[in-house]
Image (tube, rainbow, N blue to C red):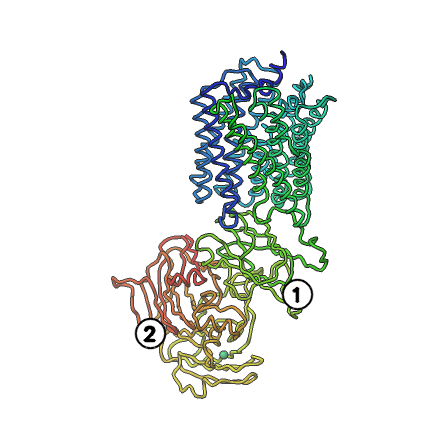
Amino acid sequence: MSSQVDHPAPTDARHPGGLKQPDLKTRQLRAHSVVAVWVGLALVAAGAQQTLPVARWLAVHLFLLGAATTAVMVWSEHFAVALLHARRPDERRSDARLAAVNLAVLGVLIGVWLDRPVLTGAGCVLLVAALAAHLVVLVRMGRGALGGRLARVVGFYRAAAAALIVGAVLGGLIATGHAGPRYYAGLRLAHIHVTLLGWIGLPVLGTLFMLWPTVLGVRMTERTTRVARWVLALTGGGLLTAVVALVAGRRWPAVAGVMAYAVGTVLMTTLLARTIRRRRPVSAAAAWMLGAAAGWLCAGVAADAGVLAVRPLTEAGEDFTLLVPVVIVGFVAQVLIGALTYLLPIVLTGGPRERAALRAVLELGWPARFVALNGGVALLALPLPDPVGTAGLLLAAGAGAAFLALLVRVLVRRGGGAGESPSSRRPVLLGTAGGTVLIVLAVLVANSGGGTDHPADASRAGGNGAAVTRTVDVTLAGMRIRPGRIDVTAGTELRLKVTNKDAQRHDLKVEGGPATPLLSPGQSRTLDLGPVTETRTAWCTLPGHRAAGMTMDIVVRNSTDDMAGMHDGPTAVTDDSNPDLSAGFSPGWKPRDAALAPALAGTVHRIELHAVRRTIEVAPGVRQQMWTFGGTAPGPVLHGRVGDVFEVTLVNDDPAMGHGIDFHAGSLSPDRAMRTIAPGQRLVYRFRAERAGAWLYHCSTAPMLQHMGNGMYGAVVIDPPGLPKVDHEYVLVSSELYLGTPGSAAQVAKMRQGAPDAWVFNGVAAQYAKAPLRAKAGQRARFWVVAAGPGDGIAFHIVGTVFDTVYEEGAYLVEPGRPGGSQVLGLALAQGGFVETTFPAAGHYSFIDHDMRHAEAGAMGMVEVSK
Ligand SMILES: [Cu+2]
């Protein structure tokens, strides 16, 4: 009978998969056990969605990379032998390849899980090697083999193996952080396409060519061989084009490639349709499901091409995830259910009567299940509001569960069947059980992730047309979440578009709400919070990151609040959370010149200082109202020599508050000179600088904690007699920075607790990290330092240097020509001094407060030393 040649696997129905050989059975059993283990782990990961940072990634990869890869490897080799009538490859080598693939997958999964790029990379390399070996076997098998009319189908398996090799390389680049933010989106899209449409899609497509006619109970049409060749060329070639284009970031060739793939699937579906004859199919249920599955693949791929055509590639990644339910549930899971419905009765029974009885059980209520499954997929795929999407999920899951129940019933009944050798059935039973779990998992995976994949459009939700939808861009970078606070009106439908702009990975978890997966650099994800009715926090779940400051507040205001709308806009700027020091300063921002201006000429210096409030950029992108002397915080540096007289006129230009001034450099009765003057008043403060040193001046009005904490301080530098000239002379006034409304309870509480938002040099956090001081190798530099507080002193240190001169509070502690050196200028509050050093070579020398709590929160800068 010629059909023996035409459709070898299914028509060789008593022994599909050649299960006659006992050793093969054992191997199949082993392989299926491995698949089942992967699936079980995937279920655990899918269930742990909200608690584990990479749970969703793990669930998807345990399912598709672990379980599906093992299954595809085993079955593609098996079917290839049958289709080509070739000799079975060496078993030990087959087992070795399979073991290598599983080991590789394990390495990749653990590597990503523990964030060990080396392990991930090694896993990818091993995976590529094992798949290359698999591909070589599939290619060699074709040589000299007799081949049948469906030998062409083996081409699909070869293309699939090549696809996974490409997918593994791309995935490896992404997972090990080699993609880089610029190419990230394109590489990720290419990775998803090549694995889903190539590794999973192509073998299923190929297998359909032989499964379909047998399900219908007809001979395949004459044109099958030709069509198979065309379909392979279109899908394989199209996919290759799309992947190359996506990697290169070129949209239109990618669209063309996906369109070609779509045309290939349509061509195949057309062939399936032409094969339909008037006679009753062997299994109408299986036929309908396989047909619908092919339809979903066509629809999914066409929609994918549409998404790529209208959306920038950087955003298409999010939309593509919407197609996952279509491909995994509509196509893969449905093919699986259809195939099992047809194959199981053939596999499990001996005679036609028994077979018909069993088929009747498996087809029980199939029209309803068919409608539920496909209706569910449709609801999941369409951009419908959430209740409808959930209904779709329940429908699809219900259909899967119903089939599972029927399977269990069949398997339990068959378990006690007479005339059957239980051991010969075991592999099949296990494979079947694995397959059904796959279906359930597919539904789970496709829709897990805290609703982030669901296209629920919040603005369309419910009948409440008044609901406001707001999308806020949230960035993760430099141990900060920005904005640090989002103010919303109660009931606002809030969406967070979370982007990781850091070099390391982060995620974002909303209290009692959804969480993003662990985001690699450049990756972004949208969290749909739905209507927000109470204040919540959000944070990065990685160990220590929350404590380091990666938190965000979502603050709900009543809609009647007259503040409503004040913070609306894409980036509601925080006013009281720790600044993001990795961010850039606003355009036009200038650092405060740290160079010490020459001493004032003459011996009497008349200076007018205005007490005035100013809003200043005190940290990257953070503006804060400061109370200042002369419009800057710290106020101007007064530089003179011993014996100079300073006549400072303080003018209080503050609209509402009294201020005074206290110069530590002078010695005089405080009563009149340091009195508080009312707004609009003037005060002359006259002192003679009788001793050298770096002195503090500050506001003398109570509460001084607040006046100083809000910026009212400065330095007076009086050169010691005979001070040698140096190449560079800098002044750095250290202080704390307290954000928030000046004088507010919250801000003052931070001052009292000694919990500043930042520590700063010359008033601005990290300013000399962004705008380094400059020097040349071998040059000598002097750093004057004054500790203004109001709460913390300083341990001033310059990384990579030794101080050969230390002048602390009026005396030399260390001088050149003596053996001792110094590493730190330690100043208690209100103390001052200077250090000198010579930069030994070109390089970047950080200067810091060696109290690392201070350094890491802004008290750091850089001296860039050139040759
Ligand atoms: Cu004051």
Q: Are marks 2 and 1 in contact (CB under 8 Å)?
A: no
Picture residue at 36% right of the left edge, 75% below the top: 692
Identify which amino acid the numbered label 2 is placed on: Gly
Label at residue 335: none
* Residue at the extreme right of the image, as rendered: 278
Q: In what element is the residue under mark 2? A: loop
Left or right, 151 with respect to 757, comes to: right
Is 857 rendered above or below residue 122? below
The residue lying toward the viewer, choosing from 159 and 468, is 468
Q: Is residue 867 visible?
A: yes
Q: Quickly name the residue at label 1.
A: 565
Q: Position of residue 385 (x, y in %)?
A: 68, 50
* Residue at the extreme left of the image, as rendered: 819
Which quadrant is the N terminus positioned in?
top right
Q: Is mark 2 within 8 Å of ligand 1?
A: no
Q: For the residues carrying marks 2 and 1, which lies nearer the camera in this image?
A: 1
Label at residue 810: 2
